[in-house]
């Protein structure tokens, strides 16, 4: 879900609305940490946030569990194919204005380093992270018919991502590279994104302890819901 620009971001650089893979910035669905957690309070807040009834949120959880067992949903919140993401959106989230389906891809030359880094820090995980699994099996990001909306400098951390924007690095990039993001808050050219990720890595402890890479971001058109499809029950 795109988000309004955060207060700590420079309004002279960052656009009013940001599309990010980082859940520090944008809400991502489904949030399995809530669905599989033990906090009923968090689940109730999640239900209110989505505007869904108790019955529908139970169907929501059931759908996720079933598709996790078939490999369509990977830990913690990755869809392994576009069809599953489309079905999930149409069944449970189509009422949310502005909701997007996005996929990400890491340029080939960075994959080995990314997987080595994840393996180094994920030895205690009960199962591989979805992003790790997709890349290790050489799955494509499924970009047929999708629109590339830019690149984002991202650092992978325990199954999710930090963005360069989480750290207020737009100031540094503007100062050193005359940085100017596009209307999504993303970077248009891989050459620029590559240069910015090198800069972020060189900062060391001034950012999160992650390896920064330039990830390509693609947006998929939402298919209209079938008129005969059963509607979800809203609050």
Image: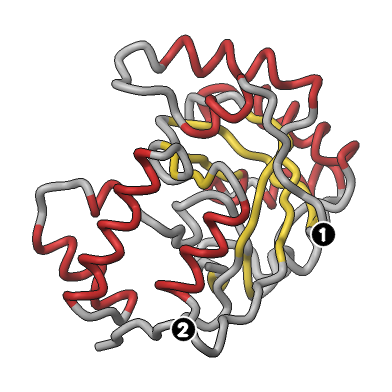
Q: CA distance from mark 2 to mark 1?
A: 23 Å
Residue at the location (39% across, 85% down)?
231
**85 is higher (above) or lower (below) than 164:** below
Secondary structure category for the residue under label 2: loop
Pick the residue in front: 174 or 230.
Answer: 230
Residue 228 pos. (x, y %): 50, 87
Q: Is residue 22 left or right of residue 191?
A: left
Q: Which mark is residue 50?
A: none
Asked whether the residues under the numbered discs 2 and 1 touch, taking CB atoms below 8 Å apart as contact, a structural biologist would say no
Q: Which comes before the other along the chain, label 2 or label 1?
A: 2
Choose between 196 and 171: the one closer to the eye. 196
52, 217: nearer the viewer: 52
Give the answer, above or below, for where 108 lies relative to 233. above
Q: Is residue 58 left or right of residue 167?
A: left
- Quadrant that contains the C terminus: bottom left
Residue ID at (40%, 72%) = 92
Query: Residue under circle 1?
Result: 145
Q: Quadrant of residue 20?
A: bottom right
Q: Is residue 207 visible?
A: no
Task: Note whether residue 2 is visible.
Answer: yes
> Where is residue 195 drawn, in percent x and y?
83, 32
Crowding near the residue tagged with mark 1, few <14, some 14–19, many ≥20 C-alpha atoms within 10 Å = few
Identity of the residue drawn at 72% across and 50% down:
217
């Amino acid at each position: 879900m795109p988000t309004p620009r955060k207060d700590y971001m420079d309004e002279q650089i960052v656009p009013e609305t940001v599309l990010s893979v980082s859940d520090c910035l944008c809400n991502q669905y489904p949030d399995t940490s809530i669905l599989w957690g033990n906090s009923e309070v968090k689940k109730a807040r999640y239900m209110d946030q989505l505007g869904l009834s108790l019955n529908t949120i139970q169907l929501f959880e059931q759908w996720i569990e079933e598709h996790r067992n078939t490999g369509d949903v990977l830990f913690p919140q990755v869809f392994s194919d576009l069809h599953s993401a489309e079905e999930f959106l149409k069944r449970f989230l189509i009422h949310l204005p502005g909701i997007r389906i996005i996929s990400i891809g890491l340029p080939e030359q960075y994959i080995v380093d990314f997987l080595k880094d994840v393996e180094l820090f994920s030895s205690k995980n009960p199962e591989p992270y979805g992003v790790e699994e997709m890349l290790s099996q050489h799955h494509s990001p499924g970009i047929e018919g999708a629109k590339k909306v830019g690149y984002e400098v991202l650092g992978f951390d325990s199954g999710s991502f930090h963005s360069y924007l989480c750290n207020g690095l737009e100031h540094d990039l503007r100062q050193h590279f005359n940085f100017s993001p596009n209307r999504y808050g993303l970077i248009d050219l891989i050459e620029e994104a590559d240069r910015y990720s090198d800069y972020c890595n060189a900062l060391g402890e001034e950012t999160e302890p992650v390896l920064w890479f330039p990830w390509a971001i693609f947006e998929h058109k939402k298919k209209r819901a079938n008129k005969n499809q059963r509607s979800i029950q809203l609050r």
